Image (cartoon, rainbow, N blue to C red):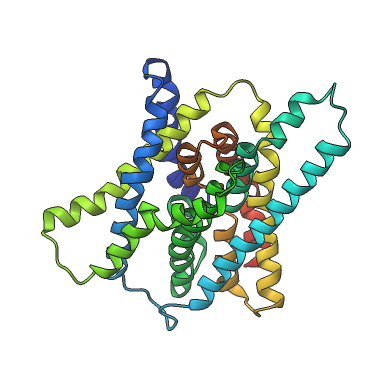
Amino acid sequence: MTETLVHAYTPLILWMSLGLLILKILPTWLPHFLGRALYWVGVPLELLALARKSQQTELSGVESWPLLASVVTIGALLVGLLVALLIVWGWRKIVCHWLQPDLDASLASYWLDPSTQGSFVLAAVLGNTGFVGLAIAPAFIQTDFLNWVVLYSITHNVVGPYGLGVLIASYFSHAKSPNRWWMQLRDLLTVPPLWAFVIGILTRQVQLPEVMESGLQGSVNIVIACAFLLTGIRLGQLQGWQNFRFAVIPSVIKVVIMPLLVGLLTTWLLGLSGDRRLAMVLMSGMPSAFAGLILAEEYNLNRDLIASSIILSTLLLLLFLPLWIGVFS
């Protein structure tokens, strides 16, 4: 287990550390530019490569494409969204009715800010099922059931960050606009990563020159490195430890509450057991996604809360991974 975690976390630590080191010499506009470049160019290239590669990947086992894994993925996203929205609603009630305005004005202002609420929901709902999930989960799942892990990751990446995630980010970004529902629909229909994934699916049978195909697949590593670098830069810009305190709740939802709910519900409602269930539990408990930070850059949400949640949930995973393996394997 330790070797697997070290292998998965080494690039994350290296690139984030580089982001922290070069922060002082970077122009102030670069982090926002990098986030928008990832949204409009980097992530679309990544999903285009993922869609084309799916045609070339042979999944082992009798269940080549277990559609139940996609159902569980979408269900986990919706349950996570419900839990996060209930907590946001509860905080609003507490802040508006119970806190003393004179003593807690800054706290009230923080939690009533739509950009903070949007980042809170994104951090609690979206998980890093791509880099971290596909690097860690296969080490604990038998080969015959790795297709469950792969399909969870594909479904989450398509439906999660650039489907549901765009709707969440757009909703809270336009919270004060009277036409925000129309803006959400517009944002969803024009999201670049989804169109890139569709184009990749439709062109899977088209043979590209070897140089282009290898370059497309190699761009995935560049996108991942840039996402880690952006996270390190944003962490270096944090003012004090206050954001880590606020990041505790979404991190606990993502790494503790969600895998527990997925494990219990898939057992009681779907009758899953063994490695099928463990695959769903592990993938649902991956730390907050770097895609959340990319969406925060694009939609001007609270970047500090997202960056803090990414770090804190990644550390929490180290503590709870052995527990989920012991309970649900």
Residue 187: x percent and y percent? Answer: 45, 52
Q: Nearer the viewer, residue 120 or 244?
A: 120
Compared to 290, does 67 lie above or below? below
Q: Nearer the viewer, residue 266 or 11?
A: 266
Compared to 307, does 93 lie above or below? below
Residue 164: x percent and y percent? Answer: 53, 57
Residue 173: x percent and y percent? Answer: 55, 42
Rendered residue at 62%/67% (across/down): 329
Asked whether, in this view, residue 52 is left or right of residue 185, the answer is: left
Rendered residue at 56%/49% (across/down): 180
Q: Nearer the viewer, residue 302 or 282?
A: 302
Asked whether, in this view, residue 296 is left or right of residue 78, the answer is: left
Q: Is residue 22 visible?
A: yes
Rendered residue at 63%/54% (across/down): 322
Q: Nearer the viewer, residue 187 or 73?
A: 187
Rendered residue at 28%/57% (across/down): 49
Asked whether, in this view, residue 153 is left or right of residue 224, the answer is: right
